């Protein structure tokens, strides 16, 4: 039986896999074309880092819009940190809730599991936007479906 924590690990693994496919495809862009996606990449990276800092009570620093090589390195670190968090996650941790938005004056709480899915789905949205630009310029990242990530892992 798959637990909620197992599913979170799978989704975060998918997120890292899809990020790398986008970043690899971006390697074929000219600097001007890369400039069109750099802010969206930075925003996606910032979201991953911000939520991880919330879950771990760590520090958050807004990332810069780096050249592609540095952006790839920053995503690799962020994705590895998210995967490490996911591998330590328990079903109890999945249900842990805090008022994550208190700094903005909201008293609502959200469960870690729900916020993990927010990070993943947020990434899906922005990767789709970037994939359109990549495809228009002849550098499609290919199929980013979750099943494409799962196929090599299915027994």
Image (spheres, helix red, strand yellow):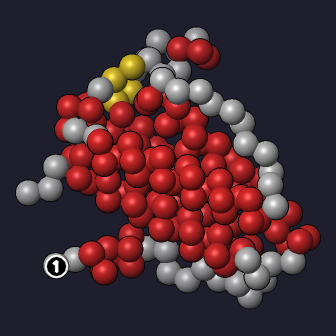
Does 70 appear above or below 146?
Answer: above
Does 42 appear above or below 28?
Answer: above
Does 2 appear above or below 104?
Answer: below
Q: Is residue 154 left or right of residue 120?
A: left
Q: Is residue 51 left or right of residue 12?
A: right
Taking the spot 91% from the left edge, 70% from the top edge, the residue there is 32
Q: Quadrant of residue 33?
A: bottom right
Q: Quadrant of residue 139?
A: bottom right
State the image coordinates of residue 43 (x, y, percent, origin top left): 69, 47
State the image coordinates of residue 51 (x, y, percent, origin top left): 51, 36
Image quarter (top left, top right, bottom left or bottom right) of the C terminus: bottom left
Taking the spot 48% from the left edge, 23% from the top edge, the residue there is 57
In the image, 112 versus 121, the foreground residue is: 112
Taking the spot 38% from the left edge, 74% from the top edge, the residue there is 149
Q: Secondary structure at mark 1?
A: loop
Does 155 appear above or below 60?
Answer: below
Q: Which residue is mark 1?
A: 155
State the image coordinates of residue 66 (x, y, percent, origin top left): 80, 55
Taking the spot 65% from the left edge, 53% from the top edge, the residue there is 74
Q: Is residue 20 left or right of residue 70?
A: left
Q: Is residue 9 left or right of residue 49?
A: left
- Residue 14 seen in render: yes
Furthest toward the bottom, the residue is: 138
State the image coordinates of residue 142 (x, y, percent, origin top left): 55, 83
């Amino acid at each position: 039986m798959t637990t909620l924590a197992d599913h979170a690990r799978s989704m975060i693994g998918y997120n890292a896999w899809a990020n790398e496919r986008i970043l690899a495809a971006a390697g074929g862009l000219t600097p001007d074309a890369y400039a069109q996606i750099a802010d969206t990449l930075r925003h996606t990276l910032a979201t991953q880092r911000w939520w991880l800092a919330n879950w771990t009570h760590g520090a958050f620093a807004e990332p810069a819009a780096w050249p592609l090589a540095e952006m790839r390195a920053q995503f690799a670190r962020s994705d590895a940190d998210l995967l490490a968090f996911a591998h330590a996650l328990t079903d109890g941790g999945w249900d842990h809730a805090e008022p994550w938005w208190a700094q903005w004056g909201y008293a609502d709480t959200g469960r870690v599991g729900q916020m993990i899915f927010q990070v993943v789905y947020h990434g899906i949205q922005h990767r789709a936007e970037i994939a359109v630009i990549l495809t228009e310029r002849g550098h499609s990242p290919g199929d980013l479906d979750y099943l494409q990530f799962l196929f090599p892992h299915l027994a």
